[in-house]
Amino acid sequence: RQSVEKKAILMGKFRDLLSGQLDDFPFHQPANIIYGAGGFSGILAGLVTTRAVDEGFEHRSGEIKQIYGVSAGVLNGFFHAVQVAARRHPGLYTPAAQNALADLEAFIAQVTPKQIARFNLNPLHLWQGWANLNPLEAFLLERLAAYTGNKSPQELTFDELQLPFTVAVARRDGFTDFLGMTTPERSYWFAGIEWKVKSAPVVRSLIAGWSMNTYIQPTTLGDQTYTDGGGTFYDAGLFVTPVDGDGTWFRYHQLFQEFLRAK
């Protein structure tokens, strides 16, 4: 509520903070974008940064490979990725998708708590979390339907939409799963296990990534139950390079494992 009331002031401060930080960024090269946590003020900071980043890539002909969203950053990442995908694959999207970021700005400008979450009055659900994200899910489904023209937006996956967006979600065991495009296959090695990016419905993935511990009841997808991606014991951003990097990290990891075995 405070972030919405002070939206203009906060975004002005974020523009001042960002000034000069991207002057030397290599916008002519491919890059990944990570939207991190930070509540609604973090979303506002993301909006400011996105405009600057979009302009940089457009003017210097670079490419956004993948956009990642963690916690509150899931909203920024989704709307940004829709706009990027609509430019690349106009046949998969309606003209409305070209203005996805403006839709997010309009939503944040007038959002109220009841447009995000609803208290769990059912005791069977209350013990899992005080509230659910049904209102936010309805809004996201309505937007995805408008962006794609599809009458069953709840079934759409990242691969079907060629949506370059990956959601970080926290598993019950403390590890992170990534939900997003699976073609070509995307994976990384951690703790002796190969972790693959999983296919999932777009909107349910967004809700899973926003299911804040204690406050919001967890989201079940397949055989896993997920909560807010910021709830894992490590920074999900550490794994972006092995999933969508240039291969250097894979070789370093391989050599490190060989070193450990030799020891």
Image (cartoon, helix red, strand yellow):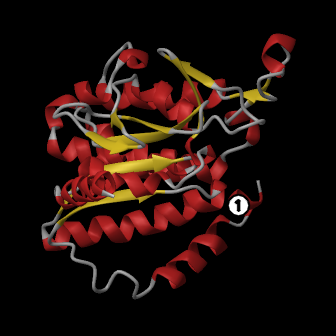
Visible in this render: residue 57? yes
Q: Quadrant of residue 181?
A: top left
Which percent across, then down, holds residue 138? 56, 24
User: How many other residues sit within 10 Å of disc 1, few (<14), some (14-19) or many (≥20)?
Assistant: some
| Residue found 68% across the figure and 35% down from its top | 115
Question: Is residue 83 depicted above or below 262 in this figure?
Answer: above
* Percent coordinates x, y for residue 237 in the rendering: 44, 56
Horizontal relation, residue 183 to residue 77: left or right: left
**Residue in the image at 47% along x and 51% along y:** 236
In this view of the protein, which residue sits in the foreground, 191 or 38? 191
When asked about the image quadrant of residue 192, the answer is top left
Residue at image x 56%, y 57%? 43
Question: Which residue lies most toward the front here?
Answer: 263
The quadrant in which the C terminus is found is: bottom left
- From the viewer's perspective, tell me whether residue 190 is left or right of residue 26: right
The residue labelled by disc 1 is 3
Image position of 70 with respect to 179: above or below: below
Q: Label 1 sits on what residue type?
A: Ser
Where is residue 111? Give x, y as percent. 67, 45
The location of residue 154, given as percent across then percent down, is 43, 17
Q: Quadrant of residue 216?
A: top right
Residue drawn at 12 percent across, 67 percent down: 61
In the rendered image of this protein, does residue 61 appear above or below residue 76? below
Q: In the depicted view, which residue is nearer to us: 174 or 25? A: 174
Count of labels in the image: 1
The answer to whether 210 appears left or right of 3 in the picture is left
Label 1 sits on a secondary structure element that is helix
